[in-house]
Image (cartoon, helix red, strand yellow):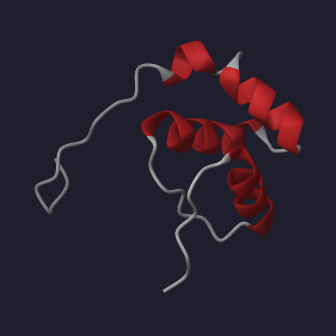
Amino acid sequence: MPQDGSPIICDTEAYSRALTDSLELSRRYTLSAYDASYLELALRMRLPLATLDKDLQRAATKAGAAVLKEI
């Protein structure tokens, strides 16, 4: 458990989505598999994506995911 007491949660669905949803996002938005997996997770969990990567921000916006703005 992290020092702040929050639990670590493993995403067991990521494996089954790697060659389907993540691959499709990678191809559609010209993302690396690594970036596409983060986008897939944000979309699936309906959570905002936190990234400074401009290409990933654009892809997330186009895909309908919320993107956290810089503070």
* The quadrant where residue 3 appears: bottom left
Residue farthest along the bottom direction in this orientation: 71
- In the image, residue 62 sits, relative to residue 37, either above or below, namely below
Residue farthest along the left direction in this orientation: 5
Please indicate whether residue 46 sits to the left or right of residue 10 in the image. Answer: right
- In the image, residue 10 sits, relative to residue 58, either above or below, namely above
- Residue at x 71% of width, y 62% of height: 57
Front-most of residues 5 and 23 = 23
Front-most of residues 44 and 10 = 44
* The quadrant where residue 43 appears: top right
* The quadrant where residue 10 appears: top left
- In the image, residue 15 sits, relative to residue 27, either above or below, namely above
- Residue at x 60% of width, y 36% of height: 40
* Residue 67 percent across, percent down from the top left: 58, 63
- Residue at x 70% of width, y 16% of height: 20
* Residue 31 percent across, percent down from the top left: 82, 44
- In the image, residue 10 sits, relative to residue 36, either above or below, namely above
Please indicate whether residue 18 sits to the left or right of residue 70 in the image. Answer: right
- Residue at x 65% of width, y 21% of height: 18
